[in-house]
Image (tube, rainbow, N blue to C red):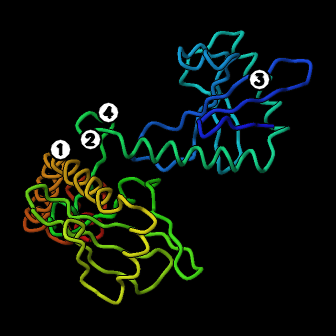
Amino acid sequence: MLEQIGNKPYFKFQISSEQAPKYIYQYPCDNPFCGCDRSVFKIYNALEDIESDRFECAFDVSCNSKFLKKNVFIEQSKERKKLVRKYLKVFQKNLTTEDWAITKILHTQQKERLIKEYNPAKIENPYLFHIMHGEDLTMMIPFHEIHPLAFSFPFTYQDTEYTISDIHCKIRACPCTDVAIELDHTDSIEFRYDYANSIIDTPKYQWVVDALKETYEDFDERLKERSNKVKRLFELHIEHIEALIRKKAKARKAKLLTSRSVGKNAPCSCGSGKKYKRCCGK
């Protein structure tokens, strides 16, 4: 039913031979830290309407679960809502397995582009690092933990397909250019790679780096971009993490003071009615 136009994230479709073709532009969720499969389909009467965003109607698409539904975030008139109901029925009935596969690929590609291009300082909904990253500054973080749909550098070596996880230092002041590389779906292949000097700490895995650089000429530059992005994100939100640490320390101190002043068999000071040893004193 859907005919992709070149490598663009839009399609041409025709409900019947008597009707003129229409066009769909696929917009992914615009949060780079979100791993959802949600996209928005906007329907246009002509290609030139896409640039000016003169759309006929819009609805949500879940690429993995193959589910279509109304969009509650885009304000639409009664006429548009009627069209949405009409198109939902048509697409739910006529979209093929191949159509769904294309929408899933395009969703991932659009998301990868968003992750590559966004500015950490201007992001509206920042990534919130877990408190453990503030308690242990030496702990590295996988890029995919921050961006679940980030590009995973697929490559082939000796007829076997691989993808990688790249794990980064998060301290902006740290001059290191090391990244920990793990091969996904393998139990033991893990090593450190210095992207600035092309040095690997485990020579027997040099074939991984060679295959990656043969597949992606800009592999080192892309690792550098990712590393800088992780460090910038952590720098921007360190105050939030420090506040969480202070809050945790305050709660620990309060619990310690309470445990010293309340007997184990006394009613708990929280008002639960339980003995202290069965409640907050556990």
Question: What amino acid is found at the position of numbered circle 2 in the picture?
Answer: Pro
- Indicate the quadrant containing the C terminus: top left, top right, bottom left or bottom right: bottom left
Q: Tell me the element at label 3.
A: helix
Marks 4 and 2: CB-CB under 8 Å?
A: no
- Mark 2 or mark 3: which comes first in sequence? 3
Mark nearer the viewer, 2 or 1:
2
Q: How crowded is mark 1: few (under 14 residues within 10 Å), some or many (20 or more)?
A: few
Question: What amino acid is found at the position of numbered circle 3 in the picture?
Answer: Arg
**Structural distance between the alpha carbons of marks 2 and 1:** 8 Å
**Which disc, if any, is residue 236?**
1
- Mark 3 or mark 4: which comes first in sequence? 3
**Which disc, if any, is residue 120?**
2
Outermost residue toward the bottom in this view: 204
Circle 3 is placed at which residue position?
A: 85
The correct choice, above or below, for 121 with respect to 188 in the image is above
**Structural distance between the alpha carbons of marks 4 and 1:** 12 Å
Q: Which residue is drawn at 48% across and 50% down?
A: 35
Marks 2 and 1: CB-CB under 8 Å?
A: yes
- Mark 2 or mark 1: which comes first in sequence? 2
**Which disc, if any, is residue 124?**
4
